[in-house]
Image (cartoon, grey):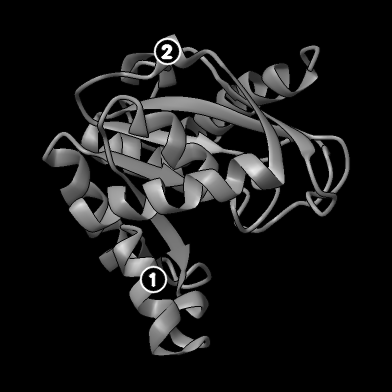
């Protein structure tokens, strides 16, 4: 964990120089207890934006990341991802090992980070999540924290304004996952989509 916070501390000055960052809803960040952070995916640096939200609470976010990032970019990239607290998931194969890893993090009261769209979406198109996060929530009874990242266009211009908004925590019983069937998972995904799309539509 020390390496994780050292990495954040190292990257923070560069982020302040490169982007005009604006945060809201920080009072909604839970200081303890298991939580699944679900966020729309605008760029490859989104995990850093989410991690800084929890840094203020002294909490590490363990992100699920596509296995290709660990396998295709060399040992240095893999070491960086591991230092950042990420772990691999094979997205198209129903990776139960990754689900077990996620459940283990939550069982210890940790924070799990997921980008439920499963890929980077470079514009502000409506957020349409896959239901994998709901499967993990159903197994662990963890609450879900909706986080949105808004930027007008791609995050390529210097000093681009980026708004990170933290929504209100969605308690496990609010997700309606008691029966843990496909329809329940779908409804939980629709609820998350409603929350995050509402945040994206707010004035920035």
The residue that appears at 41% across and 57% down in the rendered structure is: 64
Vertical position of residue 88 compared to residue 28: above or below: below
- Residue 98: in sight, yes or no? yes
- Residue 131: in sight, yes or no? no
The residue that appears at 37% across and 35% down in the rendered structure is: 36
Mark 2 burial class by Cα count in 10 Å: few <14, some 14-19, many 20+: some
Check the picture and name the quadrant holding the C terminus.
Answer: top right
Q: Secondary structure at mark 1?
A: helix
Residue underneath mark 2: 28
Q: Is residue 150 left or right of residue 63?
A: right
Q: Secondary structure at mark 2?
A: helix
Mark 1 burial class by Cα count in 10 Å: few <14, some 14-19, many 20+: some
The residue that appears at 38% across and 88% down in the rendered structure is: 75
Q: Name the quadrant containing residue 80.
A: bottom left
Measured in 3D between alpha carbons, the distance from the residue under mark 1 to the one under mark 2, in whole angstroms, is 29 Å
- The percent coordinates of residue 123 (x first, y second) are 84, 45
Residue underneath mark 1: 80
Vertical position of residue 186 compared to residue 98: above or below: above
Q: Is residue 189 left or right of residue 80?
A: right
Precedes in sequence: disc 1 or disc 2: 2
- The percent coordinates of residue 144 (x first, y second) are 40, 27
């Amino acid at each position: 964990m020390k390496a994780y916070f050292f990495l954040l501390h190292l990257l923070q000055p560069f982020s302040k120089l490169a982007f005009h960052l604006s945060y809201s809803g920080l009072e909604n960040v839970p200081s303890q207890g298991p939580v699944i952070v679900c966020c729309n995916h605008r760029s490859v640096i989104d995990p850093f934006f989410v991690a800084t939200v929890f840094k203020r609470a002294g909490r590490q976010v363990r992100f699920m990341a596509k296995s290709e990032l660990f396998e295709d970019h060399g040992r240095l990239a893999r070491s960086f991802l591991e230092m950042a607290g990420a772990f691999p998931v094979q997205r198209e194969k129903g990776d139960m090992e990754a689900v077990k890893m996620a459940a283990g993090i939550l069982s210890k009261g940790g924070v799990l980070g997921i980008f439920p769209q499963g890929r980077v979406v470079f514009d502000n198109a409506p957020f349409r999540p896959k239901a994998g996060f709901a499967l993990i929530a159903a197994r662990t009874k963890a609450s879900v924290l909706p986080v949105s990242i808004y930027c007008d266009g791609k995050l390529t211009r210097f000093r681009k304004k980026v708004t990170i908004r933290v929504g209100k925590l969605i308690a496990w019983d609010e997700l309606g996952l008691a029966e843990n069937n496909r329809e329940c998972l779908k409804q939980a995904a629709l609820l998350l989509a409603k929350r995050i799309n509402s945040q994206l539509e707010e004035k920035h």
